Every structure is written in C-alpha cells, then in structure tokens.
Amino acid sequence: MSIMADSLESEQTTSARSNSLKISLPTVMCTSEPPEKSDILCKTNSFVSSESKLSLPSNLGTPTSPLRLSSPLSLPTSPLNNTSQQNNSPLRNNKPQEDGVKTLINAGSATGNPRNKCALQPGHSLMDWIRLGNSGKDLTGVGGRIRPVTPSELALHNKQDDAWLAIRGRVYNITHYLPYHPGGPEELMRGAGIDATQLFDKVHPWVNYDSLLAKCLVGPLRYDLPDAEELFDISNPSPKSDRLREPSKAQELVRKSMENLANCITPVRKKITAKSEENVKGSPPSKIMQSLVQSSDLPVSISRRAAASPAKRSDKSPDMPPPLRHDWIQTSTKLTISVYTGPLANPGGCARITESFLLIEVATNGWLRTLKITPEAKLREPLQLRVFAESGKIEVIAYKEETGVWKGCGEVVMGVPSKVSSPRTVDCRVMRVGRVSHDTTLLSVAPKAGPVVVPLGHHVRVHRQVQDSECVRSYTPVGDGWGPTDSSDVFSALKLAVKKYDAGALSPHLSTLEVGDILTLSGPYGNFELQKLKPVKTVYFIAAGTGITPMLGLMRFMLSRSHPRCEQAHLLFFNKTEDDILFYENFDEMAKEDNRLQVSHILSDGNSSWTGHKGRITKQILVDILGKDAMKCIDKCTHFACLCGPTEFTHTALDLLKKQGMKENCIHAFMG
Ligand code: HEM
C-alpha cells in the first residue's frame, strides 16, 4: 500500500478545454443539397475535390447562412485523396441528391424509414460534437494511442456502451458519437463491431467520416493471421508456375494490413531524423498542398517515431530514464507536438512560449526532461496541454501567429534528463469561480506562464501568507467534466474544489477570490502509481467529503480503459447530509450512461426523506454494498481500492478492507 503525504483531493491532468470554437472545415460534411445552392467546398479526407460543394448540415445551428471559404479552390483532384470515397461520392458526380436518396432506399434502415434522419437530443448538434472533440476527453477509449485492431477484437466492441466500427481499414470508437449521429444511434449501431465500409457507402458515401471521427481513431484494422490451412491452401495446392499469377491469401492479408496501417498515418509523412541540437527539416510542401491547406485546418504533415533523447552514452548516468520520443503534426493554423512517456507513466508537465521558443517540460518517475523547440515562425498563446493517461502521451497544441505550412516543426533540442529536485511554484490567475455545493466552490486557475499538467491522483499546494507565517493547503485538481461547465471555461485551467471551513486559515480566503485574482501554487506532489491499476478490472472508490477529488480522474480513467476493460467501478461516497454531496449530478449522469459504475451515497445525518444508506463507515456497510467476498484477495488480483477522506475515516476504511482480506498492495490510501 502506498500512503500519500498530505494530499486531499483529486485527479487530473487533462486541461485542454477549448472555449473558443472554430468551425474548421474538416468537420463540415457534404450534404445532398444541389450544388448550386451550397457555397462551401467539400472535402473528402483532407483534401478538396475540385467541384464538390456542400452546405452546412442542418444541425449545425445556422443552416440558412452559407459559409464561404476564404479562397475557393479549383484544383485538380489530389492524388492523395481517398480514392474509393471519391469514386463513390455523389458530389463528385455533381448529382448528389438523387444518388444519395436512391442508395439510401436500397440500403434500407434499421427503422424501415428510408430517409431516416433523426431529431438529435438537445446538446447533440454537430457543434456540440466538435466541442466534445476539442474538450480533451479521450474519445478513443484506448488513451489516444493508435494501435492495430484485429477483426476478432473489433467484433467484441458491438455494444451501445462500447462500440467500434471500421471504415476503409480504420477502426473508430463510435461510442461517444452515437447520440450525435444524425441518422440515429440504432442506424449507426448496424455498423458496430464490423467492417462497415459497404454499409456506410450505401447510405451516405458523401459524409466526411474521417474528419468527424478523427478524435475517435483507434487504429488500423489488421487482418487476423490466417490459420495454417489458409496460409498453405492445402486443399488447392498451386503449381510453382502459378506463384506469380496471384498473391496468396496470406500475402493479400498482409498487404491489406499494411495498407490500413499506412492509411492511419495521415497525408504527408515526414520522418524526423534530427538528433540533439540538429535542425528538424523536411521537404517543403508542394504548391498545391500549400494552397489546399491554407484555407483549412487539416493535418498537412506529420512525423512519426521522431527524435529520441539526445543524451550521449557518456552523459548517461546508470539509472538514466529511457529516452523520450516525440512526434509533431501541423495544420495551417497550429502545430501539435506529442511527447511519449510510456504506457501508464502518469506524467506531469508544463509548456510555455518564450520569445523565441516553445519549451515543454515533462516529469515522470522523478526525472525532468525538456524539449526546446525553436519554431520556423512565431507561435502564439494560449497553448493547450493534455495527457492521454493510458498511453502516457502528452500533447501540446500551439497556434501559429500567421497561417501557413511550415517545412518542419522547427529546431528541436532535447535536454539531458535531470532529477526533479523540488516542486515548482507557479502564479496562477483565477479564471472562473463556480459553485459545487452550499459550502464548496470550484476555482478555475490558469498558470500565468503556460499550462501545467498534474499527474492523475497527485495534488498541488496552495500557498498564502497569513500574518507572518505561510499557510499551505493541498488540493487535487478536478479534471474536465466535473461541476458546472460553460463557455467561459478556460484552456488548461486547474480546477480546485475548495470547501469553506469557517474557522479555517485558508479556505475562507479562497472562497472570496474573484476572477483576476492571483494565487500561488506549488507541485505536483503525490506518490500514487497509475501502473498499479494496470491489471485492475474491479475498482472500489471509498471517499468522504472532499476526499472524493482524487477519485474523479481515476474513475473516468478506469471506465475509459479497454485493455483490460474495467468491469465494475463502485463508488461509496460518505457525507453528512444530501446537500454536502459534491458532483451529485455528475455521478448520477455517469451511472446512467455506464452501468458498470455503481454509486452508493451514505449519509451520517440524512433527513427522514433519505431512503439511501445511513451511517458511518463500518464492516456492515461495506459488506452490504460490495458483498461479503468482494474484498478478499485471490492469487492474481484484479481488484483495487482507493481511499480518501479525513484521516480517521481513511484509517478505518483501511483496517476494514484488510480485515475483509484485501492485501495492502491492492489499496491506495490518499492521506490528509
Ligand atoms: C455504417 C453504419 C451507418 C449507418 C447504417 C448510417 C445510417 C444513416 C442514416 C440512415 C442517415 C440518415 C440519412 C439521410 O437523412 O440522408 C444517416 C445520416 C448521417 N450519418 Fe450515418 N450511418 C452510418 C455511419 C455513419 C458514420 C460512421 C458517420 C460519421 C461519423 C455518419 C454520419 C452521418 C451524417 C453526418 C449524417 C447526415 C448526412 C446528411 O445530412 O447528408 N454515419 N446515417
């Protein structure tokens, strides 16, 4: 068991929440409107087909006001276009309407209604989908790490709460898209668990699925290895002379898999060959490419498996961490740098723009590593920073001051790893003050220098000078999606749930803070190891009061995992009264959406109308809710418990779990 010094609340790192929404073209689809009525050029994949046009889909909110690209293009069809999509596209033939409707009728629909366009639930328009995509939420369900999927694995993801689908060799997690699908979730579910290319093409080949589902990409569809009989085609041995005629089944499968893999690596691929302190260069994009991307926000170049850490052998101390890898990808408006720290590495970090460079600092396992990028042209703030917990990927998005396509991401210099000597202190500006209960506020604070990521289950300290002494309290930032949210949410803000204790030294002051005030934080602190959750399929979150905060990010993380898939998550949340329950609605909503989550509220002072559990934490309550044998450890345990609350509560919970047969290494107690 690991005990974390002086933490209280929770989670999360992910802070990239987009509040200024850009209607960028990749997410706009072609509809079946006659071309002359519509004014926007249509894109398939990342490119513009010469004569295609489209209008805004009706659920975008302003269907009557056509948009026009700043520079309408009339270009020859790019060879990089998705050819099969193009060939099928009614838009390409300039008679979208008739063809679209005809194929739809042929295809039929699950509900028997040929033109089965659904009224979407409020909050599920295309704009809302774009917003969700930009919110930083992991829509892939696999931590954002692109990895191959076999057809048999794909077939397992065929349920409404866990649905994958493949189109043209790419597998997408469509679970989150279901309520946003204009044809309705039932229709979309027809493609779940299978290669839905034909089905998709029958219904609406003009839809730009690739952009719409860009944030849901799991990886290429890799065909299962054929069994021996298939490989050697024993039943029909081909004479030697036939060998050249047709590829074998095995060759064909390998070819298809390779093709799919290549497909998942977007348009132009450039390999970074840079080593330490060398320029990272690529060949300049062609003129056609330049003009194609000037008017859009589509990925134009990408690097894979980029430069490793430059540390030369002689620089390495014996326990030097493994080198960091990084990638970059650009659109005409932004540059995205991804740094890979390794699966479940639970990194912390920060990013900032100084006069001439973009500095990214990454901390894992006590090591600090830096990436200094001198960009080709100026970048501007705000930066976005987010972490994909499963893969350990850190993504930094920086906007270009001037729109354009760069030759490369600029000069990249990797610093030699150094030991993290002491936590950082940062000044933050209060960006928003919300309420989460009668006595608890949610402070959104943004570090002045640039975004900061706090590892999952770790916390920060708030410092304040009270008379002559420094007052310090610990808070675990609450990730996105908890408490009230609105358009004033800020990129990369850390959200702290502050409960006001009237006699407290710091909380009364924090509760009076207003937008614009400055707060000093230090961190991150904590000893929670995400790796411990690697094999876990059943997780118990046992929390009291503000002790809920470390659980929030972990809960979302566990429910989003697919390897292994978390089968059950129990939250036992102890409070005094109903009014004291933090994030009540969020839990309610989550439990409704995902039946793997069971939430039990236990009140020590519930009023007479309270029909739920009452009392304090006891063996009986644990057994009643979790079951007698649920806590017992077996040989290869796949369960884990997280505990957090007032010190006495946490100790009691720990004792009870141990008495029920749970081993210490299956428990993490966040100690206050
Ligand atoms: C493969 C299984 C799918 C089926 C059976 C299906 C079915 C349908 C149906 C019946 C409609 C209503 C058609 C209309 O009114 O024109 C529709 C519309 C739509 N679907 Fe799908 N769909 C599937 C996959 C997808 C995917 C993967 C996406 C993209 C992410 C998607 C995006 C859309 C869009 C944007 C519309 C509105 C199209 C328009 O207004 O022209 N669908 N779908």
Image (cartoon, grey):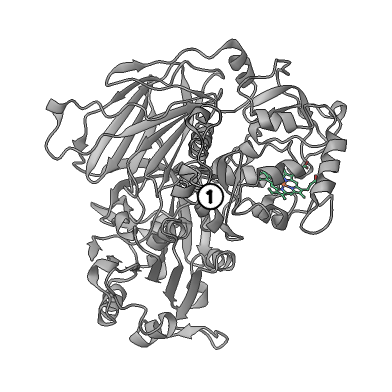
**Near-viewer residue (2 or 521):** 2
- Residue appearing at x 24%, y 46% in the figure: 365
Say whether residue 380 is visible.
yes
When the figure is inspected, residue 168 is found, relative to residue 483, above or below; the finding is: above
- Residue appearing at x 33%, y 48% in the figure: 346
**Near-viewer residue (441 or 53):** 53
- Residue appearing at x 51%, y 62% in the figure: 436
How far across and how far down the image is residue 193, in percent? 59, 54
Q: Is residue 352 left or right of residue 102?
A: left
- Residue appearing at x 65%, y 53% in the figure: 178
Specify the quadrant that holds the C terminus: bottom left
How far across and how far down the image is residue 525, in percent? 27, 52
Amino acid type, label 1? Pro
Q: Is residue 8 left or right of residue 609?
A: left
How far across and how far down the image is residue 490, in percent? 52, 43
**Near-viewer residue (285 or 193):** 193
Question: Callout 1: 10 Å neighbours few (<14), some, many (20+)?
Answer: some
How far across and how far down the image is residue 142, in percent? 46, 50
Q: Is residue 276 left or right of residue 82?
A: left
Question: To which residue does mark 1 refer?
Answer: 151
Say whether residue 227 is visible.
no
